[in-house]
Image (tube, helix red, strand yellow):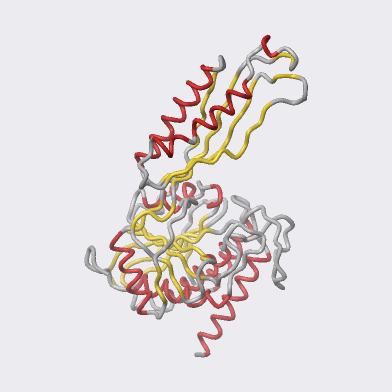
Amino acid sequence: MQETENLQKKLTGWFEWFHRHPELSYEEYHTTEKIREILTQGGIRILPYELETGLVAIVEGEKPGPVQALRCDIDALPVKEETDLPYRSECPGKMHACGHDFHIAAGLGCAILLSGHKSELAGTVKLIFQPGEETSLGALKILETDVMEDVELIWGIHADPTNEVGTLGIREGYVAAAADRFVITVTGQGCHGAHPDDGIDPVPAAAAIVQGLWTVTARNINAFHPALISVTRMQAGQTWNVIPESAELEGTVRTMNREDRALFERRMREIAGGTAAAYGARASVEWLPGSPAVYNDERLAGKSMRVARECGFSVVPEESSMGGDDFSFYEERIPGCYIKIGTGKGPTIHQPAFRVDKRAILPAAEYLVRLLMSPSDPAGQS
């Protein structure tokens, strides 16, 4: 009991430190050093990868078994915190508004507990403290190394402010969308605003393209497949009396299905090009692929639910989200499972009032240990 209370105190203190000192994607230098310091003091080996930020630790069991990985992301967001927490952010305009400070603390607790049970651990666990998840591409920094070459399966967690502490959201199948970005440039011919017949106005062409893009989900995508497009920026011109030469659209496409993702890109190019031509203009499309969709392996999802119930958690179906997570890049190589951990109901992630109930940290760490140490289930069983 005393040991548990001591660990709870340590985890709470670490969590508060990370919350007070948020760092943005690829700037997590102090965060990385603090993680390194804690792991080193705990006697946990850190693998010698030359990552600018983030690190990978390893705990090797004394029994034969699989090589597993646990991904914990570490970056914060450019959000001004609006809470009354005594440990609120000390970095103006930066905040752990997505719960990555919780992920770090739970991951550290898991590493420490695992290290104390090496004699019972079958196989090896690599603990990935990953930078840059909020860019949707941070996982690629890890995958540029050979960290994953011998890893057979991977687990991921995320703070969930839609559920109370003691509740886990888990389900098999797609749980987060592919997150792609696009930029469309419509080029016409600038002229005086009083003489539009002297030029080619790109603004109505761009507006028509926006309207056309919305038809992709309504007329090209299977109605039972989640998909959406959001045009989030439309920019043209510099002054009131000049028709600009060009207009620019930017936004995001979210899909769950691999074929739908490819279809959206193809239809975007067709609609943008054809619509612009109808107005006498030209359009170019820059498609910037982000992370693919997150897919929970059936066997791993079943195991995670079984272990959750054994640990006394309530299990509810994990809500699918059109948000993305670069955890999916790992899943392109190996099976994975992405688990939502209830951190107390309140403002949702990426909001300035978001907060985590600290009582969720130790149970999360203990659950992860049990999950990583539990024997594998037969395929398809839970």
Q: Quadrant of residue 345?
A: bottom right
Residue 333 vertical position relative to residue 11 in the rendered view, above or below:
above
Extreme residue in the top direction:
198
Q: Quadrant of residue 201?
A: top right
Question: Percent position (x, y) of residue 87?
Answer: 69, 71
Name which residue lies at 70% across and 67% down.
83
Question: Percent position (x, y) of residue 193?
Answer: 74, 17
Name which residue lies at 51% across and 56% down.
130
> As rendered, which of 64 and 109 lies closer to the eye?
109
Question: Percent position (x, y) of residue 110?
Answer: 46, 72
* Picture mark count: 0
> As rendered, which of 154 and 178 lies closer to the eye?
178
Residue 344 vertical position relative to residue 28 in the rendered view, above or below:
below
Give the quadrant of the C terminus: bottom left
Name which residue lies at 67% across and 27% down.
236
Extreme residue in the right direction:
240
Question: Percent position (x, y) of residue 240?
Answer: 77, 24
Name which residue lies at 58% across and 74% down.
357
Residue 353 vertical position relative to residue 233 in the rendered view, above or below:
below
Q: Quadrant of residue 221?
A: top left
Q: Is residue 158 left or right of residue 307?
A: right
